[in-house]
Amino acid sequence: FTTKTVGQGTGMGLAISYQIITQKHGGSLECISQPGVGAEFIIRIPLQQLVSNF
């Protein structure tokens, strides 16, 4: 969903969301889509953040 007119914006919302969910939070983002039916997004974020000892 967007409030911008066609041709406006960068179209990077999903890519940025994916980066934040996977890289920053160690989670996953899954999309299940069927033409004419719709799309379902599954976002999984761990309850505890993994801590690296490096």
Image: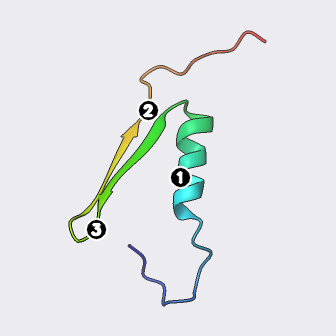
Which structural element holds mark 3?
Answer: loop
Q: Residues within 10 Å of mark 1 (few under 14, many from 20)?
A: few
Q: What is the three-letter code of the residue carrying label 1?
A: Ser
Mark 2 lies on a secondary structure that is loop
Q: Identity of the amino acid at label 2?
A: Ile
Left/right placement of residue 31 relative to residue 23 reads left
Find disc 2 in the rendering and name its residue.
45
Q: Nearer the viewer, mark 1 or mark 3?
A: 3
Q: Residue at x 49, y 33 (%)?
A: 27
Q: In the picture, which quadrant includes the C terminus?
A: top right
Front position among marks 2 and 3: 3
Q: In the rendering, at what x and y percent does residue 19 appear? A: 60, 46
Rendered position, 5 above or below 13: below
Q: Which residue is mark 1?
A: 17
Q: Relative to 30, does residue 36 appear above or below in the rendering?
A: below
Q: Residue at x 55, y 33 (%)?
A: 25
Task: Tell me the crowding category of disc 2: few under 14, some 14 to 19, or many 20 or more residues within 10 angstroms, Cα based.
Answer: some
Task: Give the label on residue 35, or none.
Answer: 3
